[in-house]
Image (cartoon, rainbow, N blue to C red):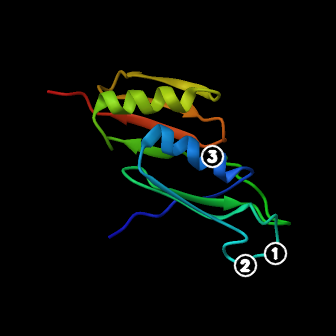
Amino acid sequence: MTAPQIYVSFPGTREALGFYADVFGGELSLHTYDDFSRSDGPPDAIAHGMLNGLVALAGSDAAAGQKSVRLEGVMLSLLGTAEPSVLHEWFDKLAVGGRVVDPLAPKPWGASDGQVIDRHGLHWLIGYEAGP
């Protein structure tokens, strides 16, 4: 069984997916409107971009008449997806130019988690269970 794939219409996909590649690592591939023979946007706009790795994201520049990302009531969860030190590193990098909603720290229920909205508007929930 596979998980749903996150696919976002960004107002600047090249920069956004490049940012996530810097945060999470992985392999980034970008294809322009021109590559796909699309004429509903600038030839150098991104028609499809994909970050493959431990964290996978895909997206494109919004075509004429389409809306860019705007999330309300949705968080992208990275609970337990990596070692705690890696999760703290990701959290700190996502916070640059973004907004920390709740610091990544131990919580009363024994786990550590936190929330950050990055500079591209994605809301992340990052955390892990306490070790033995």
Q: Quadrant of the C terminus?
A: top left
In three-dimensional space, the C-alpha distance between marks 1 and 3, rounded to whole angstroms, equals 22 Å
In three-dimensional space, the C-alpha distance between marks 1 and 2, rounded to whole angstroms, equals 7 Å
Residue at position x 47%, y 30% from top? 91
Residue at position x 67%, y 72% from top? 35
Q: Residue 77 versus residue 35: which sits nearer the camera?
A: 35
Q: Residue 15 versus residue 99: which sits nearer the camera?
A: 15
Residue 79 position within the rendered picture, expressed as x and y whole percent measured from the top left = 37, 41
Q: Secondary structure at mark 3?
A: helix
- Residue under numbered circle 1: 39
**How many labels, in total?**
3
In three-dimensional space, the C-alpha distance between marks 2 and 3, rounded to whole angstroms, equals 23 Å
Q: Secondary structure at mark 1?
A: loop
Q: For marks 1 and 3, give the one nearer the viewer.
A: 1
Residue 30 position within the rendered picture, expressed as x and y whole percent measured from the top left = 58, 60
Is residue 75 found left or right of 121 in the rendered image? Answer: left
- Residue under numbered circle 2: 37
